[in-house]
Amino acid sequence: MPGPRLTGPNFGIGWGVGSRRSKIQRGAARWLSALLAAGPVAARDVADAATRAGFSHQSLLRAKARAGVLSQRIGRRFVWKLPPTLPG
């Protein structure tokens, strides 16, 4: 049985709130937030850790957006860090 079409009326099916993909995205965002909780981490190290944890590169990028992770260049490298939290 062929899978869903990637265009037209079936595009995006499977991305609902309770879908498996949505759960993976939430899990990846929680994982990424936990990884960065102690402070900034080199982007390359984040990507390597995500691969070891079983997340695809695309899932990692979605998790980055979902968690509001910031990317900052320091010298010749990029680091990822959590956004600052407001006191209170």
Image (cartoon, grey):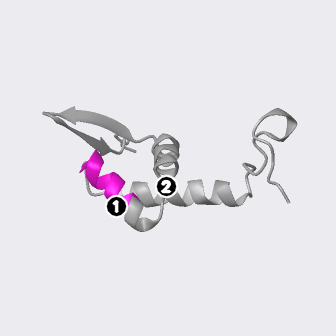
Q: Which image quadrant is residue 20 in?
A: bottom right
Secondary structure character of the magenta stretch overall: helix
- At 40% from the left and 60% from the top, the residue drawn is 51
As drawn, the residue found furthest toward the left would be: 75
> In screen coordinates, is 16 left or right of 85?
right
- Mark 1 is surrounded, within 10 Å at the Cα level, by few (under 14), some (14 to 19) or many (20 or more) other residues, namely some
* Residue 49 is a magenta residue: yes
Residue that mark 1 sits on: 49
Check the image and report above or below for 15 versus 19.
Answer: above
Q: Which mark is residue 56?
A: 2
Foreground: 66 or 83?
66
Tell me the distance, in whole angstroms, between the alpha carbons under discs 1 and 2: 11 Å
Foreground: 35 or 54?
54
Foreground: 27 or 53?
53
Foreground: 33 or 47?
47
Q: Which mark is residue 7?
A: none
